[in-house]
Amino acid sequence: MRKRVIAGNWKMNMTGTEAKKFLKKIVEKINTDKKEIVLCVPSIDIPIVNNIIKNTKIKLGAENFYFENRGAYTGEISAEMLIDQKVSYVIIGHSERRQIFKETSKMINKKIIKAVEENLIPIICCGETLKQREKKETLSHIKKQIEDAYKGVDEKYVKKTIIAYEPIWAIGTGKTATADEAEDVCSYIRKLIKNLYDEKISQEIRILYGGSVNKNNAKEIFSKENIDGGLIGGASIKEDFIDIVKA
Ligand code: PGA
């Protein structure tokens, strides 16, 4: 049985002060070990959030990092720095980082390799644009993204990695993929992992759906065979997150 993961992606929201106030309201209600609850928060909020959740079952995640150990990389944060602050998960390859910050698949691959080597759990994002979906290029695009992401990733690390399928047209738009559309792509991703590695690994790896998940649609999406939870943006900075965790 794959343990479900509900990961919040706060993006560039929540000052430290706001985070304290918000978490006070929700921490007790999302504190469970029946599912893996992960809060991926802005780097500057990490110590604040860690301080609040340190005695709970809730896990701490970052939204980004850089793959070098240390040195002249102004503005960047290393894996070691994250680990020092009790971070155990990191989002890699989010479409906003690919599109706005021009992260290439090569950089994303380097980050994934660095993360697993440092024992950080990467939440690896993939997803197609609306144009690609309309041109029926969804699966070929996902195949390329997954193959690029896992290039050179040793099989001993793979089952610990998490993949988030996030169609770009569904992110922050209120437009969700239907549960069946999401399931189709997630089951395809599982097949890709089987082809790249083996059946056992493909059955162990967790695959999430993300893109306008809310308290009303979460239950149906999470009921699908190949969807092991969600990466939640907008709804993770509202009390709605409690209902999504319970869905
Ligand atoms: P959304 O974002 O839930 O606001 O659509 C999801 C994400 O970008 O991870």
Image (tube, rainbow, N blue to C red):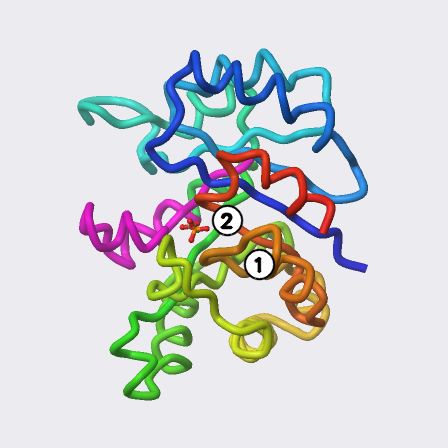
In this view of the protein, can residue 50 be seen by the observer? Answer: yes
The CA span between labels 1 and 2 is 9 Å
Q: Is residue 116 left or right of residue 151?
A: right
Q: Residue 146 appears at what percent x and percent y?
A: 43, 67
Residue in the image at 69% along x and 59% along y: 219
Residue in the image at 59% along x and 78% along y: 180
Ranked by sequence position, the earlier of labels 1 and 2 is 2
Q: Is residue 216 left or right of residue 10?
A: right
Quarter of the image where the N terminus is located: bottom right
Q: Residue 84 appears at what percent x and percent y?
A: 50, 17
Q: Reply yes or no: does residue 105 show up in magenta.
A: yes
Mark 2 secondary-structure assignment: strand
Q: Reply yes or no: does residue 99 show up in magenta.
A: yes
**Mark 1 and mark 2 residues within 8 Å of each other at the beta carbon:** yes
Q: Which amino acid does label 1 sit on?
A: Leu
Camera-side residue: 103 or 153?
103
**Disc number placed over residue 123 in the picture, else none:** 2
